[in-house]
């Protein structure tokens, strides 16, 4: 057998092998590609929430924030001690709305949902809020919601049990800043105004980036990502 004949036979064998593998498996199995399948991801998120694991993990993080506060408050605080909360998927859960749109986002539908002011609280965060209030901390809500949603946001927060606060800061609709830039600048201003932010809680990394808080606590949110 010549060199070329042997090479052709090897090539034919490898092609046959390749073809056979493809024919045996049909479509690639989930997991063969390094990319999630959207439908499977949605099912996993529904199960994560409906099984109670989501609330459980929120409660776990909120409990860590409480533990930090308990220890921190044994030491003196320079200014007025404060805690900063994001609103959506931190204090209020919009899961019911988001799941009703099959995890899509439609601005008009979102505005209608905000206007209903019916989002329930995330229980673990509500308990953290109540603890912070009992220790006399200033509470600041810092949200990417726009100023025209102030009234409904206040109504929803109160209805969910967040009944008092020092400030509710909303992001102007025409702002060119990212959420992270806006929120960091607001915390800087709060610090300059004499608040000592001990804890900052949010569901997005952009809620927590940029400093001006002694500690940060990141809640789970598998549903969306914001810059
Ligand atoms: Mg949020």
Image (spheres, rainbow, N blue to C red):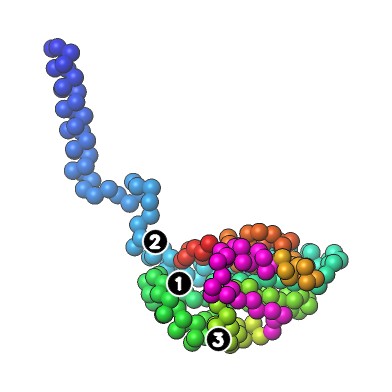
Q: Is residue 185 above or below residue 20?
A: below
Quadrant location, the N terminus: top left
> Residue 216, percent across and down?
67, 62
Query: Which residue, as the protein is rendered here, is positioned at the far top?
Result: 2
Look at mark 3 in the image and give the residue it sits on. 152
Which of 133/168 is in front? 168
> Residue 201, percent across and down?
64, 67
Residue 110 in the magenta stretch? The answer is no
Which is more foreground, mark 3 or mark 2?
3
Q: CA distance from mark 1 to mark 2?
A: 14 Å
> Residue 77, percent across and down?
84, 67
Q: Is residue 160 above or below residue 209?
A: below
* First in residue order: circle 3 vs circle 2: 2
Look at mark 2 in the image and give the residue it sits on. 41
The residue carrying pointer 2 sits among few (fewer than 14), some (14 to 19) or many (20 or more) residues within 10 Å by Cα, namely: few
- Residue 208 appears in the rendering: yes
Q: Kindly indicate the quadrant of the structure image that contains residue 21.
A: top left
Q: Which residues are magenta?
A: 164-187
Q: Secondary structure at mark 2?
A: helix
Residue 177 in the magenta stretch? The answer is yes
Look at mark 1 in the image and give the residue it sits on. 50
Q: Would residue 113 be found to the left or right of residue 33 on screen?
A: right
Q: CA distance from mark 3 to mark 1?
A: 27 Å
The residue carrying pointer 3 sits among few (fewer than 14), some (14 to 19) or many (20 or more) residues within 10 Å by Cα, namely: some
Residue at 73% from the left image edge and 70% from the top image edge: 190
Label 3 close to label 1 by CB (< 8 Å): no
Q: Is residue 82 above or below residue 2?
A: below
Q: Is residue 183 above or below residue 147?
A: above
Q: Kindly indicate the quadrant of the structure image that contains residue 41.
A: bottom left
> Residue 106, percent across and down?
40, 75
Q: Would residue 19 be found to the left or right of residue 190 on screen?
A: left
Which is more foreground, mark 1 or mark 2?
2
């Amino acid at each position: 057998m010549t060199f070329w004949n042997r090479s052709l036979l090897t090539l034919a064998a490898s092609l046959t092998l390749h073809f056979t593998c493809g024919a045996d498996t049909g479509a690639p199995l989930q997991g063969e590609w390094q990319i999630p399948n959207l439908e499977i991801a949605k099912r996993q998120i529904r199960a994560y929430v409906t099984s109670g694991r989501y609330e459980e993990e929120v409660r776990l993080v909120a409990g860590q924030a409480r533990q930090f506060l308990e220890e921190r408050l044994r030491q003196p605080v320079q200014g007025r001690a404060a805690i900063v909360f994001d609103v959506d998927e931190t204090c209020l859960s919009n899961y019911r709305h988001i799941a009703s749109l099959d995890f899509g986002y439609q601005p008009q539908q979102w505005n209608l949902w905000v206007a209903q002011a019916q989002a329930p609280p995330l229980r673990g965060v509500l308990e953290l809020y109540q603890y912070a209030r009992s220790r006399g901390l200033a509470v600041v809500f810092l949200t990417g919601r726009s100023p025209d949603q102030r009234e409904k946001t206040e109504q929803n927060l109160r209805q969910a049990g967040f009944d008092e606060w020092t400030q509710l800061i909303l992001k102007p609709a025409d702002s060119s800043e990212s959420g992270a830039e806006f929120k960091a600048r607001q915390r800087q201003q709060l610090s300059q105004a004499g608040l000592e932010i001990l804890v900052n809680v949010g569901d997005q990394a952009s809620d927590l980036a940029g400093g001006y808080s002694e500690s940060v606590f990141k809640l789970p949110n598998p549903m969306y990502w914001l810059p």
